[in-house]
Amino acid sequence: MITIETAITFNDDLPDEVDVVVIGGGVNGVFAALNMRRKGLKVVVLEKGRIAGEQSSRNWGWIRQHGRDPAELPIMMEASQLWESFDKEVKGRTGFKRQGVLYLSQTEAAQEKRETWIDTAKEHGLNTVAISKDKLSNFIQRDSSTKDFWFGGVHTASDARAEPWQAIPAIAELAHSEGVIIRENCAVRALDIQAGQINAVVTEAGYIKTAQVVLAGGAWSSLFLRRHGINIPQLTVRASVARTEAIAEVATSNSADQGLAYRRREDGGYTVALTDFEEHFVGPDSFRHLSKWIKTGYQSRHDLKLRWTALKDTPAAWNVDRRWQADQITPFEKMRILDPAPTPGKIKLMQQRFAERFPQIGEPKILNAWAGMIDAMPDLVPIVDRVPQLPALIVSTGMSGHGFGIGPAFGRIIAQIACEEKSEHDLQRFRFSRFSDGSRLDIGPSI
Ligand SMILES: Cc1cc2nc3c(=O)[nH]c(=O)nc-3n(C[C@H](O)[C@H](O)[C@H](O)COP(=O)(O)OP(=O)(O)OC[C@H]3O[C@@H](n4cnc5c(N)ncnc54)[C@H](O)[C@@H]3O)c2cc1C
């Protein structure tokens, strides 16, 4: 996992002028930069902390087509192919493997619900199939003396995984080798807007003149935009993850049921997480965007816990400056890497649930645990679009807990947007204006 202790790898000199400045060196910023460079643009990526220091190294590493919003699915199917080819380009360093995704059901009703997605998969030519109880042993290794834990499952064999903390730095190195300028530990403080046009970005290390900007700032995007009077109803949730020691294989595919998710890692351990627990830290934005979020919040009420003391200096916190001058130290410099502690008690619960499912292993030893702050939009699909009132600004954010897998394809789409090319994909669902143009909120599958 990448933290503030991770050494700085990219420390290029700041250019005076570029075609595009990318704010944020997560999966979105890095793939966008590489794709734009391949279209001949001069690009700089500015990252306040470390490449992939936030969500992009902390996620589960699922490259999942299964269960996607129908508007995301064709993009995700492309992304899945792109992961495979990028992995070849970096000689296997992303840890990519097509090991499938298996959603397990503990009751017949849950199984029926899961199977409804198979029609969507079929419409798009995706090989998702229902798995009956007696066939689960092809995917899950359990002691035959233990009683059945699952009623059945739904499986997508072409789904995959990568190891996030090595994948995005490897893609950043590829981008760098092709001429993308990258600077870590360099926050963008503000846009320099003159006569309604972007003229430059102001960084903590100086100005860069630019024609366009891509904001891929993850959990910080809304704070950055607000400084310029641009409002998006983005909120965040904390999700905790743990890594087990290497153990015998218990599940071949990335698997999840109503309580636990686990996926086999390249190192022989499992990345495990709870599937029924996330936390939202209430802060000023929670109230500001309440009307947009109330329906989504209600739908998630069983899994989402509210916390009344937002973590200091994080974008949700009460203490964070929401207005600053470009010559002042900003919230982005005060918190180089958003590295929340995992929720107390929940790692033990992961161990217990693992043992319940796999008594032959018992409670696995946890080598380390961490958390990430997921950035989400009220309809649980991202914004990938130009900002109507400032068209030189392209926003790619609000990935809503599933932006790692889809990153390579959104990267290609952002490059198309930057070059004024028409995308083959229908991007209407991801338009910037949907929260302000009176559209009905159409909530996607889940975080
Ligand atoms: C626990 C967890 C599990 C997840 N599991 C999965 C999964 O299995 N599959 C999946 O597809 N997705 C998953 N996700 C979601 C996925 O990780 C994110 O959607 C994705 O990484 C978002 O990428 P990003 O580039 O938009 O943002 P981030 O990775 O958060 O990157 C944004 C970057 O912008 C930088 N930044 C912000 N503001 C500034 C500024 N002003 N100047 C300079 N830099 C700035 C930040 O430091 C940060 O590094 C998970 C997320 C979490 C937290």
Image (cartoon, rainbow, N blue to C red):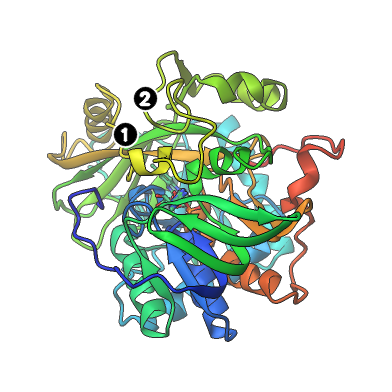
Circle 2 is placed at which residue position?
A: 311
Above or below residue 223? Residue 249 is below
Q: Amino acid at mark 2?
A: Leu
Query: Which residue appears at 15% of the width and 39% of the height?
Result: 364
Instruction: Give how far apart the Cα atoms at labels 1 and 2 are.
Output: 8 Å
Camera-side mark, 1 or 2 = 2
Query: Which residue appears at 14% of the width and 48% of the height?
Result: 245
Residue closest to the far right = 438
User: Quick one: 272 or 166, which is closer to the camera?
Assistant: 166
User: How far across and how far down the image is residue 122, in percent?
Assistant: 69, 61
Residue closest to the far top = 308
Badge count: 2
User: How far across and how far down the image is residue 38, in percent?
Assistant: 54, 84
What secondary structure is marked by label 2?
loop
Above or below residue 403? Residue 441 is above
- Mark carried by residue 104: none
Circle 1 is placed at which residue position?
A: 340
Q: Are marks 1 and 2 in contact (CB under 8 Å)?
A: yes
Asked whether, in this view, residue 57 is left or right of residue 21, the answer is left
Give the image quarter of residue 352.
top left
Q: Residues within 10 Å of mark 2 (few under 14, many from 20)?
A: some
Asked whether, in this view, residue 427 is left or right of residue 193, the answer is right
Q: Amino acid at mark 1?
A: Pro
